[in-house]
Image (tube, rainbow, N blue to C red):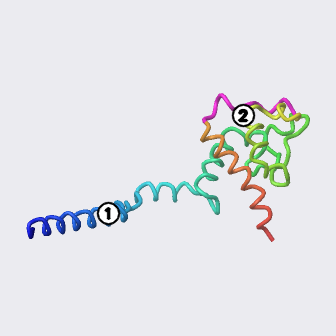
């Protein structure tokens, strides 16, 4: 009888220990310091990592017409009719769905100039998301300035 009681106590202690260990979960892993350093280095000004990546893409694909600061004053803007919009002053820039459509299908898809090319087949889904985030940050920067 005593052997049964000690065996039952041992099983109960094992079950209790196991249930406590399962609740705490594995210890959290520390962040990767190298990745954190790279991301910090890639940030520009007050932009987040995602917005900074979008700015890199914007400067590569869009700045020729829209300008480095997205004011519609790029080196090719004078050759376009209608000229590219000043994205820092646009209220439609806040609409992520509209931005995504313009980037992927070109501005003709939303009834604007057919001169803005569709980038949907050239850019990855993630790159499009980066561009949308950067374009939305343009309106935020304008409202923060005194």
Residue at 80% in and 49% down: 93
As rendered, which of 97 and 130 lies closer to the eye?
97
Residue at 66% in and 40% down: 128
- 72 sits left or right of 47 in the view: right
Q: Image quadrant of residue 111?
A: top right
**Tag shown at residue 33:** none
- Furthest-right residue in view? 82
> Does dot 1 land on a helix, a strand or a loop?
helix
Q: Find residue 72 and report its horizontal and vertical position in percent.
A: 83, 46
Write down the residue under mark 2.
104
- 89 sits left or right of 59 in the view: right
Write down the residue under mark 1.
19
Q: Find residue 51 and report its horizontal and vertical position in percent.
A: 64, 53
Q: Find residue 114 and report its horizontal and vertical position in percent.
A: 84, 29
Mark 1 Cα-neighbour bin, 10 Å: few <14, some 14–19, many ≥20: few
Label the magenta part by its dominant secondary structure: loop
The residues colored magenta run: 113-124
Q: Image quadrant of residue 3?
A: bottom left
Residue at 76% in and 37% down: 101
Label 1 to label 2, Cα distance in Å?
Answer: 50 Å
Q: Find residue 42 and report its horizontal and vertical position in percent.
A: 54, 54
As rendered, which of 11 and 121 lies closer to the eye?
11
Q: Is residue 72 above or below residue 23?
A: above
The reply to whether the magenta stretch includes residue 13 is no
The quadrant of the picture occupied by the C terminus is bottom right
Mark 2 Cα-neighbour bin, 10 Å: few <14, some 14–19, many ≥20: many
Q: Image quadrant of residue 137?
A: bottom right
- 30 sits left or right of 131 in the view: left
- 44 sits left or right of 36 in the view: right
């Amino acid at each position: 009888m005593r052997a049964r009681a000690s065996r039952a106590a041992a099983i109960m202690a094992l079950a209790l220990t196991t249930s406590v260990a399962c609740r705490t979960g594995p210890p959290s892993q520390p962040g990767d310091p190298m990745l954190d350093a790279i991301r910090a280095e890639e940030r520009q000004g007050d932009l987040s990592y995602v917005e900074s990546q979008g700015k890199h893409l914007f400067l590569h694909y869009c700045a020729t017409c829209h300008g480095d600061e997205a004011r519609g004053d790029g080196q090719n803007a004078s050759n376009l009719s209608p000229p590219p919009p000043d994205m820092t002053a646009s209220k439609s820039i806040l609409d992520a769905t509209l931005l995504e459509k313009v980037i992927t299908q070109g501005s003709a898809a939303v009834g604007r100039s057919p001169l803005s090319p569709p980038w949907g087949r050239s850019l990855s889904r993630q790159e499009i998301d980066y561009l949308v985030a950067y374009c939305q940050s343009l309106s935020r920067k304008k409202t923060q300035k005194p």
